[in-house]
Amino acid sequence: MTTFDSLEHPAWCDPQQCGAADRSSYHRSAVHVIDSPARGGVSVAVQLACEGDEPLGDAPVTVGLTLTRGEYTSVEEYHLAYSTASGLQTLLDRLLQPAGQGLLNG
Ligand SMILES: [Zn+2]
């Protein structure tokens, strides 16, 4: 029987979330949540994943993005390629920089 400890895992893999010990399943990170500051707003949950049956370093890492609006009224889940998520990070850094200078509201 394959166990968590008998496998090699990415540094970001969370033992509580990892399913790689199950055949054809995924390494998964912890789920990181950004709550909405406003009631009824959109909360964001992020989780990394990669296939467990491919060699580490070769398996593409995807970014699971789950958007939840309000009290479980609307949930959407997306899986972004690493390059897409990295591009989003760069774009948000650039767009949000003025917020740190007081140029944007909220
Ligand atoms: Zn794992």
Image: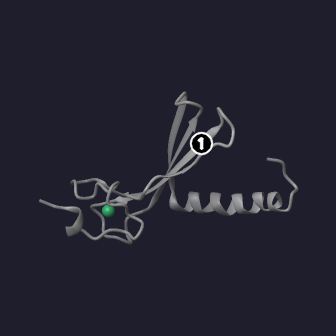
SS at badge 1: strand
Residue at 57% x, 46% y is 44
Residue at 33% x, 55% y is 16
Residue at 64% x, 42% y is 36
Is 100 positioned to the left or the right of 81 in the image? right
Which residue of the protein is positioned furthest toward the top in this rendering?
A: 73
Residue 74 quadrant = top right
Residue 58 appears at what percent x and percent y?
37, 69
Coloration of the structure image: one colour
Choose between 6 and 53: the one closer to the eye: 6
Is 16 positioned to the left or the right of 94 in the image? left
Residue 68 quadrant = top right
Q: Amino acid at mark 1?
A: Ser
Q: Is residue 91 above or below residue 38?
A: below
Give the residue number, with chain letter if any, for mark 1.
43
Q: How many marks?
A: 1
Instruction: Quadrant for the N terminus, please.
Output: bottom left
Q: Is residue 57 above or below residue 99?
A: below
Ligand 1 falls in which quarter? bottom left
Residue 90 appears at what percent x and percent y?
67, 63
Is 100 positioned to the left or the right of 91 in the image? right
Choose between 80 and 13: the one closer to the eye: 13
Residue 92 appears at what percent x and percent y?
70, 58
Choose between 75 and 90: the one closer to the eye: 75
Residue 75 appears at what percent x and percent y?
52, 34
Residue at 46% x, 57% y is 62
Mark 1 lies within 8 Å of ligand 1 (Cβ measured): no
